[in-house]
Image (tube, rainbow, N blue to C red):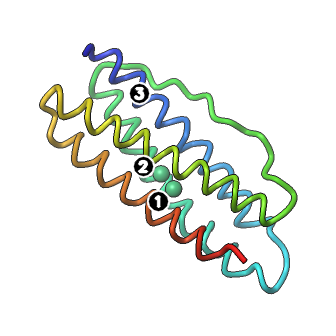
Amino acid sequence: MSTQALIDGLNEALNRELSAVIRYLLQGSTIRGRRNQPLRKMYRDEVRDEISHAQYLVDKIAMLGGTPKVDPDVTPPPANVEKIIENDLAKEESDITHYKKLAQLAEQIGDIELKMQMEEQAADESRHADELRRMKD
Ligand SMILES: [Fe+2]
Ligand SMILES: [Fe+2]
C-alpha cells in the first residue's frame, strides 16, 4: 500500500467532512418549525464535530507530504425534513464504512495513531447516525 493511496483516502474523507460541515451549517439555520427545533440544534452541535474531523484530516494529509484537495459537495439540502434526515443518515453510514477502511490501511502501515483516530471518527459518525435515527418520526 502506497502513501499516495492513503493520502487519496484521507482526501476523500476530508471532502466528505467538508460537505457535512456545509450541509449541517445550512440545515442548522434554515430548518423551520417548532417541532423541528431539536433537529436544528443537533445540526448546530454536530457541525463542530465535523470541523474537528476535517481539521485532523487536513493536518494528517499535510504531515504525510500530501496536498489537501478541497472539493466539497455543495448541493443544497433537500427541502423536506424527512428527506434531509434520510440523506444525512445514508452519508453518516458511508462515512463509518470509509473510516473503517482507513483504519485498516493505517494498521497495515503501522500508524497506530492514525488507526485509533480513524476508529474514533467512525465512532463519532456512528453516534451521529444514532441521533438521526432518533429524530425520525
Ligand atoms: Fe465527521
Ligand atoms: Fe457525522
* Label 2: element kind: helix
Mark 2: give few (<14), some (14-19) or many (20+) Cα within 10 Å. many
- Say if 37 sits above or below 26 in the image: below
Question: Marks 1/2: CA distance?
Answer: 6 Å
Label 1 lies in ligand 1 vicinity (Cβ under 8 Å): yes
Q: Are marks 1 and 2 in contact (CB under 8 Å)?
A: yes
Classify residue 58 by image quadrant.
top left
Q: How many marks?
A: 3
Question: Marks 3/1: CA distance?
Answer: 20 Å
* Label 3: element kind: helix
Q: Amino acid at mark 1?
A: Asp
Return the x and y of residue 59 as percentages of the image width and height. 34, 36
* Label 1: element kind: helix
- Which residue is tagged 3? 9
- Which residue is tagged 1? 49
Return the x and y of residue 31 as percentages of the image width and height. 80, 69
Q: Is residue 2 left or right of residue 67?
A: left
- N-terminal of the pair, mark 3 or mark 2, is 3
> Disc number at residue 53?
2
Please name the residue shown 69% across and 62% down the image.
85
Q: Are marks 3 and 1 in contact (CB under 8 Å)?
A: no
Q: Amino acid at mark 3?
A: Gly
Please name the residue shown 73% across and 57% down the image.
26
